[in-house]
Image (tube, helix red, strand yellow):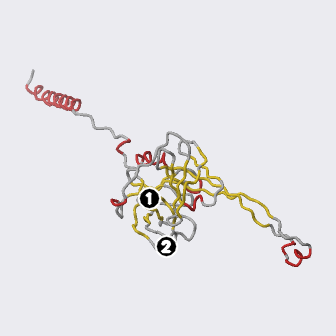
Amino acid sequence: MSQSLRWLLWPVIAGLITGLVILVAQKSAPAAPQATTSTAPGYAEAFTRAAPAVVNIYTSKLVREQRPTVFDDPILRHFFRRGNPAEREKVERSLGSGVIVSERGYLLTNLHVIQGADEILVLLQDGRQAIARLIGGDPETDLAVLKIELDQLQPIPLGDNRTTRVGDIVLAIGNPYGFGQSMSQGIVSAKGRYGLGLSSYENFIQTDAAINPGNSGGALVDHRGQLIGINTAIYTQSGGSTGIGLAIPVDLA
């Protein structure tokens, strides 16, 4: 083989050897870890832990109201000796939320959610429903205790308000506008709010988690799904959530 041909072959041989080394190195290198859904940020675990204990509450109340007639005029009523004006009956319905706090079927909610109701229907996350009876209510704190007769209930884990700090992540779970169970996320905006005229004893947790009509009596939980408050009111001029929600601390409830 001529010397010029050997000089031409050496670069080709060197290239083949280099390529073979790179190929072997790639096959022996460990595979990159695959991303899994369990590492994704979020509060699904907190919802899974707390949601089975949060119920939807529907109430009905029979209301009698006077129907205006020509005999409402005092002169005509006296003339025809008609003492009682005509009456009609209607059923008023409202909605709210509640939290299961005992395997024996005891629930916490707001007193204003069920006050005056003739019937209280409780709907669980698993689709079961039951008629609840009122065990007791406290207008001083706007709290009420209900009882349902169902088995295999999952009470909510309780948190500790003493460790709750302004800025902590919180989740509001309830039944806004009757849509069914929903969750919203925010932070603790303030603690110890009082002087709002909502109840006689006020020591509210303030949050910017969206709380709307129907959320009253529902759960305010921390990022671990532990109950830290009972959602009770919103500060609004429009009727919807404006970023100022109020909850009764769990230690008081």
Q: Residue at x 78, y 67 (%)?
A: 66
Q: Are marks 1 and 2 in contact (CB under 8 Å)?
A: no
Question: Which kind of residue does numbered mark 2 sit on?
Answer: Leu
Residue sitting at 68 percent across and 59 percent down? Answer: 92
Residue nearer the viewer, 2 or 114 = 114
Q: Which mark is residue 22?
A: none
The residue carrying mark 1 is 229
Most extreme residue toward the left, as rendered?
A: 3
Q: Position of residue 63 (x, y in %)?
A: 72, 61
* The furthest residue to the top: 1
Q: Quadrant of the N terminus?
A: top left
Furthest residue in direction right, as rendered? 80
Is 169 rendered above or below residue 124?
below
User: Taking 14 as reference, is 72 above or below it?
Assistant: below
Residue at the spot 56% in from the left edge and 71% down from the top edge: 237
Q: Quadrant of the C terminus?
A: bottom left
Q: Which residue is mark 2?
A: 196
SS at circle 2? loop
Name the residue nearer the viewer: 247 or 208.
Answer: 247
Looking at the picture, tell me which residue is in the foreground, 247 or 223: 247
Query: What element does badge 1 sit on?
Result: strand
Q: Amino acid at mark 1?
A: Gly
